[in-house]
Image: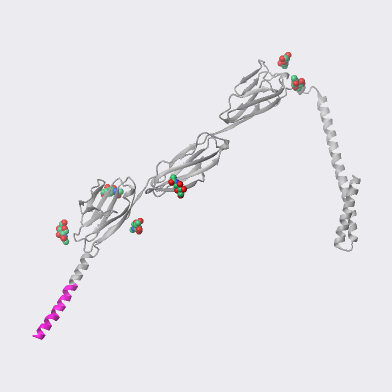
């Protein structure tokens, strides 16, 4: 009886172990690879995000997707949350894929795929939503500026995520700006400023703000502001002849720059009005003398003004006598030649004399300085030498 009972328990124990082991083995086999697999997703706002959850070996256990707020979106092929943007793409024992259309920045977060085994197995997928920067705007330029004014250009773009990058170009050459990033909700407002004290060279300069972002691929958003700088006129008289002669046609042009362009320009002669002669015509910025006359000699002045300032230039007209200019005979050339030779000889003489004097003076000074050699020591020698030098200087003056 005792033995029988004992045997039973032994057998029971063995059997139990075998059964248990088999069960464990079976379970292990069944749940091998039975876990959900997901991937992080990155999309641009406004587009559609597909969230996929896969299970390689599934014994018909249900899958579920839930959002960052732990709300169930889909349980198998059953829609759980009322949101028109969320739709089922594929539902099987091996896969549950849903799509979220018109994604906003607030859809970002950690989504969970759950496999309802015992215990439940989950996999997290992070949905990253990128914010597209808005078209940039340049502010702070009250056109037109006046030369010497400090101008600050600020380029602003909002809505980017991550924060956009702003680059500045002045006539296609990059210039440095100062960037400032502020978080506004889930996206960023980025602004960049450039400062400059404008001068006339900045008139017409094009400043381009270029917004670069991963969502824009390699086509940045750009906006350009062309500077307009007002500055005082700058006037220069250009003349048509180098040697104006009597009877010739002569033209002076008053070339003026300035913004606003100074118009008209004012011509005067010797501080007064232009003589009222038919030969003299003013056409815009040009002063034309149809037939030059000796009486036209004088100082001509062109003056230009705009609301910033006034500037002028002068031209001294000297009307040559055409008869005096062309030499009549050989005597002119002869006199010229003789004068040239005399000047040359005189110059040579001066140079030779100068060299002779310089050399002579040098020898004289050296001889005097030799007296220093008689000194007992270096210090005395220097003193002696200095003394002699001072002496020499007196003599030098005398010599000259
Ligand atoms: C989402 O899945 C659907 C169906 O497979 C497909 O047509 C669409 O292109 C996918 N969208 C993205 C962003 O992968
Ligand atoms: C899984 O479901 C399919 C039908 O959807 C059924 O034919 C199969 O027997 C099920 N398998 C298990 C292990 O429940
Ligand atoms: C998914 O995104 C989260 C949060 O950004 C990150 O911690 C995790 O490492 C990512 N996983 C993979 C597989 O990239
Ligand atoms: C942006 O942030 C800076 C500090 O980083 C702050 O000084 C500035 O006032 C902010 N600008 C706006 C418009 O919020
Ligand atoms: C210059 O003007 C004077 C007086 O107006 C006139 O008598 C003279 O003929 C002119 N000379 C020439 C070369 O035109
Ligand atoms: C004008 O210049 C000429 C030199 O060519 C001179 O002979 C003449 O006297 C000058 N006339 C006046 C009005 O100054």
Question: In which quadrant of the rendered image does the N terminus lie?
Answer: bottom left
**Is residue 20 found inside the magenta-colored segment of the image?**
yes
Q: Is residue 146 left or right of residue 134?
A: right
Q: At 48% across and 37% down in the image, what residue appears? A: 225
Q: Which residues are magenta?
A: 1-21
Question: In which quadrant of the rendered image does the C terminus lie?
Answer: top right
Q: Is residue 39 left or right of residue 222?
A: left
Quadrant assignment, res 376: bottom right
Q: Is residue 385 left or right of residue 257?
A: right
Q: How many marks?
A: 0
Q: Quadrant of ligand 2?
A: bottom left
Q: At 85% across and 36% down in the image, what residue appears? A: 346
Residue 278 lies, in percent from the top left, at 65, 15
Quadrant assignment, res 351: top right
Q: Mostly what secondary structure, the magenta segment? A: helix
Residue 195 lies, in percent from the top left, at 53, 42
**Is residue 257 found inside the magenta-colored segment of the image?**
no
Please tell me whether residue 267 is drawn above or below residue 142 in the rendered image.
above
């Amino acid at each position: 009886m005792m033995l029988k009972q004992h045997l039973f328990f032994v057998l029971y124990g063995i059997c139990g172990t075998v059964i248990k082991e088999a069960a464990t083995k079976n379970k292990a086999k069944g749940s091998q690879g039975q876990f959900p697999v997901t991937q992080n997703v990155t999309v641009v706002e406004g587009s559609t995000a597909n969230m996929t959850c896969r299970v390689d070996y599934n014994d018909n256990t249900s899958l579920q997707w839930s959002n960052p707020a732990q709300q169930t979106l889909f349980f198998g092929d059953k829609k759980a949350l009322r949101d028109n943007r969320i739709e089922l793409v594929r539902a099987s024992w091996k896969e549950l894929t849903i799509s979220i259309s018109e994604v906003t920045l607030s859809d970002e977060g950690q989504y969970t795929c759950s496999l309802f085994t015992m215990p439940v197995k989950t996999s997290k997928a992070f949905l990253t939503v990128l914010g597209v920067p808005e078209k940039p705007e340049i502010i702070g330029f009250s056109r037109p500026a006046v030369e010497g004014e400090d101008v600050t250009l600020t380029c602003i773009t909002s809505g980017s995520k991550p924060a956009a990058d702003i680059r500045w170009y002045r006539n296609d050459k990059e210039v440095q700006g100062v960037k400032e990033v502020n978080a506004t909700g889930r996206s960023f407002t980025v602004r960049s400023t450039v400062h400059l004290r404008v001068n006339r060279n900045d008139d017409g300069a094009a400043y381009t703000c270029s917004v670069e972002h991963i969502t824009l691929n390699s086509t940045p958003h750009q906006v350009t502001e062309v500077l307009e700088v007002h500055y005082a006129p700058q006037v220069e008289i250009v003349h048509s002849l180098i040697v104006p002669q009597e009877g010739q046609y002569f033209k002076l042009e008053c070339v003026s720059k300035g913004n606003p362009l100074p118009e008209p320009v004012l011509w005067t002669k010797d501080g007064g009005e232009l003589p009222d002669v038919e030969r003299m015509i003013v056409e815009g910025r040009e002063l034309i003398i149809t037939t030059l006359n000796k009486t036209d000699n004088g100082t001509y002045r062109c003056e230009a003004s705009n609301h910033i300032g006034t500037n002028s230039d002068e031209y001294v007209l000297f009307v040559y006598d055409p008869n005096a200019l062309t030499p009549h005979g050989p005597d002119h050339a002869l006199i010229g030649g003789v004068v040239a030779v005399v000047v040359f000889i005189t110059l040579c003489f001066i140079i030779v004399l100068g060299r002779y004097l310089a050399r002579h003076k040098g020898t004289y000074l050296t001889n005097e300085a030799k007296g220093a050699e008689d000194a007992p020591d270096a210090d005395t020698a220097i003193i002696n030498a200095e003394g002699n030098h001072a002496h020499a200087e007196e003599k030098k003056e005398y010599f000259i």
